Image (cartoon, grey):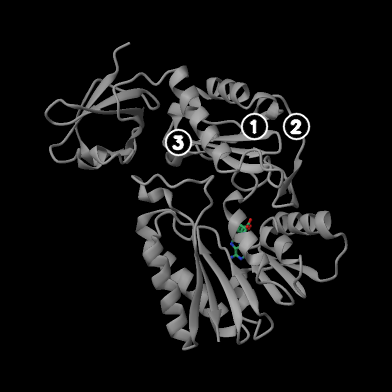
Amino acid sequence: MERIKIVLKSGKEQSIRRFHPWVFSGAIKKIYGNPVEGDLVDVYDNKGTFLAVGHYAPSSIAVRVLSFEQVTPDISFFREKIKRAITYRKSIGIIGNPMINVYRLVHGEGDGLPGLIIDYYNGVAVIQMHSVGFYRIRKEIVAILVELMEDQIVAVYDKSEGTIPHMSETIGVNEFLYGKSDPVIVTENGYKFKIDWTTGQKTGFFIDQRENRKLLEKYTEGRTVLNMFGYTGGFSVYAMKNAAIVHTVDSSFPAIELANENIKLNYGDDKRHESFQVDAFDYLNHIKDQYDLIILDPPAFAKHNNVLANALQGYKRLNIKAIEQIKPGGIIFTFSCSQVVTKENFRKSVFAAAANTGRSVRILHQLSQPPDHPVNIYHPESEYLKGLVIYVE
Ligand code: SAH
């Protein structure tokens, strides 16, 4: 079947020529035909030169590019891409590591598969489609995954209900597409976590903080730790290795329950840990100088560019409260996972917060996402997780 052709306005082919994998609707001069959301389309420049093939959507990102070569993205094409994602993770010691059986197997643009996320939880793959193009071929993707992972997959759960674009007519359903499984216990750097993909946020766990949690472990000895926005208690579990006290704060009751369960899995009834279901900003109003290590890992304050200024204010306010009150010699791990907030903007917010308090602040580490969430060098937006570790006198 001949694919629908999309021609770009003159000059608008520049970013595609630099391998950026999105075509914005404003760059389109003409569409030859009536593509339906999820169709494969070919993209050409104004002079008729082929640029790329990708999945079409009637939204501001009109095409998510699958290849810059004139190929047919069929089963063997996707099989090859997923195989490369697996080979990459094997070669960097993520797959096959006895200390880790929870990782991201496919990271959208980072693995050349825009719109597709696959996370692996000790035998259960959770697949999340962010485009109708991938949703249509989900069964084929699952078959490829099961084949390539050999005996490493017990079940595949589709969690696309909330991630298929809201403009679309397609409505995802959360369900098992292969096998079945109850929640599993995973191992991350030797620590245990219970994962429930059906009720959990995202695919069930914030895998992207693995290395930052490992770094935290180095700084917790004897400290009084506050883990704000704790969710599953990921940072708390690492901190409990040798901290004096660990407090987990989250506004959600299920999150607090999960954090408590994970602490118990690793430490039993350990009185050093306590959790509080309360709003983070309220909690931070009353902490004075109780803590000498604070983790700030809030949800994305900005999902769109039009609320960027508010989001930056939010990061600044949050960081002011922590910097103001932490004990002298205290350490703050502060993060932003908003894709629209750049590394530079996040730094500026934290700098402004520090300046506001007047305290002396040094940067110990600048953090990002781990290599199973690879950043496509041609797609700066895929570098979404930013963190700073600061020392406050
Ligand atoms: N640090 C976590 C991930 C945090 S996700 C980890 O490593 O896994 C963000 C969390 O912030 C969610 O659990 C959400 O319930 C919580 N949250 C959102 N708004 C909040 C608020 N105003 N106060 C406290 N917690 C909040």
N-terminal-most mark, 2 or 1 = 1
Residue sitting at x 54%, y 20%: 140
For this rendering, which residue is in front, 167 or 148?
A: 148
Q: Quadrant of the C terminus?
A: bottom right
Residue 301: image x %, image y %?
48, 61
Residue 142: image x %, image y %?
58, 24
Q: Residue furthest top?
A: 1
Residue 299: image x %, image y %?
54, 58
Question: Which residue position holds label 3?
Answer: 115
* Element assignment for label 2: loop
Question: Which residue position holds label 2?
Answer: 181
Q: Is residue 352 left or right of residue 322?
A: left
Q: Is residue 132 above or below residue 196?
A: above
Q: Amino acid at mark 2?
A: Ser
Mark 1, Cα crowd under 10 Å, few <14 / some 14-19 / many 20+, is many
* Element assignment for label 3: loop
Kindly tell me whether mark 1's CB lies below 8 Å from ligand 1.
no
Check contact, mark 2 vs mark 3: CB within 8 A.
no
Q: Amino acid at mark 3?
A: Gly
Q: Is residue 64 left or right of residue 170?
A: left
Residue sitting at x 52%, y 28%: 83
